[in-house]
Structures are given as C-alpha cells and as structure tokens.
Image: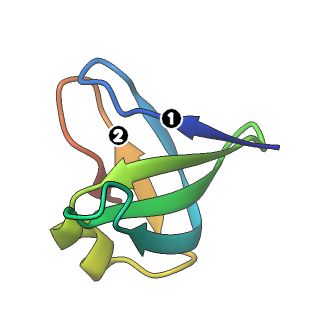
Amino acid sequence: MIKSLKVARDDSWEGVVTDKSRGMLDGSNMYHFVEIRLADGESVKVRIARRLWKSIEVGDRIVKQPGADPAKG
C-alpha cells in the first residue's frame, strides 16, 4: 500500500527510492515526487526539491533528519 507523506520539518525517516515522477498538479508549477520503501516495508510517496530529484536514481537511499530537508544518503 502506498500512502502520500507531506514532509514536515520535524519528521525523520530513511528509505530506498523505488520510483520517480513529476507533474504539474496545479497547472502552473512542476512538482517532483519519489516513492520510497521504508525500513519497515511501507511505501510512501513524498514531494522533494527539484535539485534532489535530479541527483537521485531508483535504488538510491534518501534520509530525512528532523529539522533538515531530505537528502541523498
């Protein structure tokens, strides 16, 4: 099951990228998403910055620490 996760500043998680996508959900802004498989086996879809989206590939690890943005890890 995939659930959508809005990234909050105080969240922390890490996982492996299983899919990348992007879209113009509101018709004027491009949004970048990755699907991540967390350590507990759960899959989540999160919105990330364009720069990070361009630098990662499927199979890369992403880490989100409290107070920081998601980063390649």
Where residue 20 appears, as percent x and y from the top left, is 50, 73
**Relative horizontal placement of residue 24, taking residue 50 as reference (left or right):** right
Most foreground residue, 65 or 29: 29
Q: Secondary structure at mark 2?
A: strand
**In percent of the image, x 20 and y 62: which residue is there?**
29
Local SS, label 1: strand
From the image, which quarter does the C terminus lie in? Answer: bottom left
Image quadrant assignment for residue 72: bottom left
- Considering only vertical position in the picture, is 29 above or below 38? below
Residue extending farthest to the front is 27
Taking the view exactly as shown, the residue that stands out farthest to the right is 1
Identify the residue at image location x=27%, y=79%: 55
Question: Label 1: which residue?
Answer: 5
Q: Residue at x 74, y 40 (%)?
A: 42
- The numbered mark, 2 or 1, whose residue comes first in the sequence reads 1
Q: Which residue is mark 2?
A: 64
Mark 2 crowd level (few <14, some 14–19, many ≥20, 10 Å Cα): many
Q: Quadrant of the N terminus?
A: top right
Residue type, label 2: Lys
Q: Is residue 50 above or below residue 8?
A: below
Badge 1: how crowded within 10 Å, few (<14), some, or many (20+)?
Answer: few
Residue 46: give x, y in percent of width and height.
Answer: 46, 47
Looking at the image, residue 17 lies above or below residue 64:
below
The kind of residue tagged 1 is Leu
Q: Position of residue 12 (x, y in %)?
A: 40, 28
Disc sitting over residue 54 in the figure: none
**Of marks 2 and 1, the one in the foreground:** 1
Task: Tell me: residue 67, above or below residue 13.
Answer: above
